[in-house]
Amino acid sequence: MKNTIGNPQLTEHGTCRGEPSAFALWASADKCVRPVNNTIGSMQCAECGVVLVALLWVFIALSAIVLSFARESRVEVTAIRNAQSLEKAYYIARAGLSETIYRLLHQRFSSPVSTPGLQQEPTPLDLGRIEGEFGGGRFLVEIQDESGKVNLNTVSEEQLRTLVLATGIPPRDADIITDSIMDWIDQDNAHRINGAEDEYYQTLNPPYTPKNGSIDATEEILLVRGVTPEYFYGKPEKTDDGSVIYKYGLSRYLTVYSNLNRNQINVNFAPLPVLLSIPGMPPEAAERILERRRTNPFQSPREISSEIPGALGAETLQYLMTQATGTYTLHAAAYERNSNVRRVIRAVVSLDGNQQNLHRILYWNESVPSYEGATL
Ligand SMILES: [Ca+2]
């Protein structure tokens, strides 16, 4: 409802004239009208609606800000908790390494007395796995004797290629890795068919030059063409029954610490791919060696000939030995309890020290991918 008023008048611009409060009037199509009280009330309610909508938007915006802060806070809290777990796992792994070194030294300097005829259970050292708890977490240390690995600095091209293939790396990548490692070590700058020399490495970002010399640590081959972290460290793989197993990488089979003059392999510690890489080694003979040493380690290469008559030629036997080097790669994996954050340390330790310095750390790597090595 509207009350028409004779005065004021509608101007040619569509506004009302002569009314002290222009706000109280509004222009109809052809005249000025004064809204009655309920019309004014309707206008005020319309304004209220606008205010309510605005408040609603403000409320939504504030809620979004609060939720964003809450999410950021939760992420930060999780990150801090993970960092703390990672730090604790680091020291738990170090504790595992210390205990393993102690046990190795104890075994080295003690004189175990064996009882003939008594069947003895293998010790954790025999199995190469030391497990334990420390500081609210668990550790597992895997012991690998370096004498059971192939020496990168003395291996032949053919044996290295056989080894790389035996680890399950596809033939094309195995050719690239083998040729490139050989090119990395040799003095010249002429690359093999699938290899790489300075010309290739200068195209990388950042560019670098190949070693053209002996390898100082096995991790050095991560710089070599074709050697990816997965090929080197290994990776977890799903089996047909859905369980996850760890598939070892090249680091499990290569060393720079074993016999530098003769490329001999300790048959009591060599994993299957290493045994298969030995020139002239039939696969069935490698399986027999693995089976026999589980219960009765070989005392000399001659025992292998008597165990597997006619299977190994004189040339193959030259690659075999039974002496340990006293040098071990130790993989220490650790968790803090109630945390899935895992820390892995990889160290090479030599026990050839004297009474004042019982062991020496030859290599130490704290940047190992957490999936590497044994699992807890
Ligand atoms: Ca070279």
Image (spheres, rainbow, N blue to C red):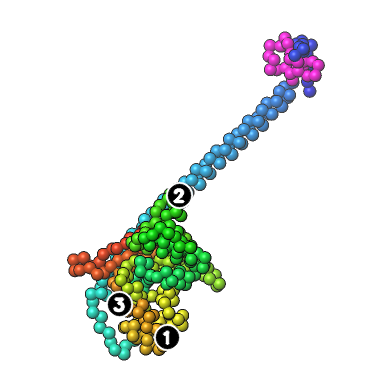
Residue at (48% x, 66% y) in the render: 174
Q: Residue furthest right?
A: 30
238 in magenta: no
Q: Is residue 34 magenta?
A: yes
The residue that mark 1 highlights is 311
Q: N-terminal of the two: label 3 or label 2?
A: 2
Alpha-carbon distance for marks 2 and 1?
50 Å
Residue 68: percent from the left, percent from the top? 52, 43
Is 85 on the left-hand or right-hand side of 39? left
Q: Are marks 3 and 1 in contact (CB under 8 Å)?
A: no
Which residue is located at x 36 percent, y 56 percent?
A: 87
Q: Is residue 297 above or below residue 225?
A: below
Q: Position of residue 253 (x, y in %)?
A: 40, 69
Q: Measuring 34% from the left and 83% from the top, which residue is drawn there?
A: 301
Q: Left or right of 33: which side holds 252? A: left
The image's mark for residue 323 is 3
Mark 3 residue element: loop
Q: Is residue 279 visible?
A: yes
Q: Secondary structure at mark 2?
A: loop
- Badge 2 crowding class, 10 Å Cα cut-off, few under 14, some 14 to 19, many 20 or more, is few
Count every numbered label the image shows and give the total.
3
Based on the displayed image, in which of its 4 quarters is residue 348 positioned?
A: bottom left
- The image shows residue 245 at horizontal and vertical percentages of 48, 69
Q: CA distance from mark 3 to mark 1?
A: 22 Å
Q: Is residue 369 visible?
A: no
Q: Amino acid at mark 1?
A: Ala
Mark closer to the chain start, 3 or 1 = 1
Give whichever of 132, 24 is nearer the camera.
Answer: 132
Disc 2: which residue? 205
Amino acid type, residue under disc 3 in the picture: Gln
Q: Which residues are magenta?
A: 14-35
